[in-house]
Amino acid sequence: MTWVYWPQDNQTATIVRYQTKGELHPNGNNYIFLNPVSGEISKAVYADKVPFVMRALNQVYPLHIGKVGISIFRLLIFLSGLFPIFMLYTAYKYNRLKSN
């Protein structure tokens, strides 16, 4: 279990959010809605049962925060983020040498 969203009143369901094995999202995209009065499951939403478009959109966040891939892949993403700084530095040095 990752998160529990408690209801503000007796009409709103309690929502339990959890991660299943193999899911990339760190908090999970599976939801169970519990009836606030009886405690029975009123609805369940599973990440692997949603339409393809929603599954694709759910994979954007883990990619954005860097939770996807092995260490080499993460290092490659980190270095690609530093590449613009390297290009700016080399352009600055080139222009200084060219003006002398």
Image (spheres, rainbow, N blue to C red):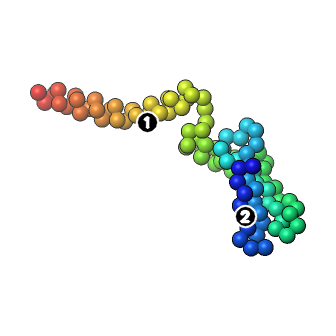
Q: Quadrant of residue 70?
A: top right
Rate crowding at label 1 as few (under 14), some (14 to 19) or many (20 or more) other CA atoms within 10 Å. few
Side (left or right) of 7 relative to 66? right
| Residue 51 is at least partly visible in this image | no
**Which residue shows up at 47% across the image and 33% down it?**
78
| Residue shown at 76% from the left, 43% from the top | 20
Furthest-left residue in this view: 100
Q: Residues within 10 Å of mark 2 (few under 14, many from 20)?
A: few
Name the N-terminal-most of marks 1 and 2. 2
Q: Is residue 98 above or below residue 35?
A: above
Q: Secondary structure at mark 2?
A: loop
Position in image of residue 8 (x %, y %) = 71, 71
Residue kind at label 2, given as amino acid type: Trp
Residue closest to the eye, 37 or 85: 37
Of 85 and 39, which appears nearest the observer? 39
Residue at x-position 28% and y-position 29%: 90
Residue 79 placement (x, y as % from top left): 44, 30
The residue that disc 1 covers is 81
Mark 1–mark 2 Cα distance, whole angstroms, equals 39 Å
Q: Closer to us: mark 1 or mark 2?
A: 2
**Dot 2 corresponds to which residue?**
6
User: Do the CB atoms of the residues marked 1 and 2 lie less than 8 Å apart?
Assistant: no
Give, as a three-letter code, the residue at label 1. Answer: Gly
In the rendered view, would you say 39 is above or below 31? below
Q: Quadrant of residue 65?
A: top right
Q: In the displayed structure, does residue 74 sit left or right of residue 10? A: left
Secondary structure beneath disc 1?
helix
Q: Position of residue 83 (x, y in %)?
A: 39, 32
Q: Position of residue 48 (x, y in %)?
A: 76, 45
Residue found at x 88% / y 67%: 38
Between 91 and 37, the one nearer to me in the picture: 37
Check the image and report above or below for 52 versus 41. Answer: above
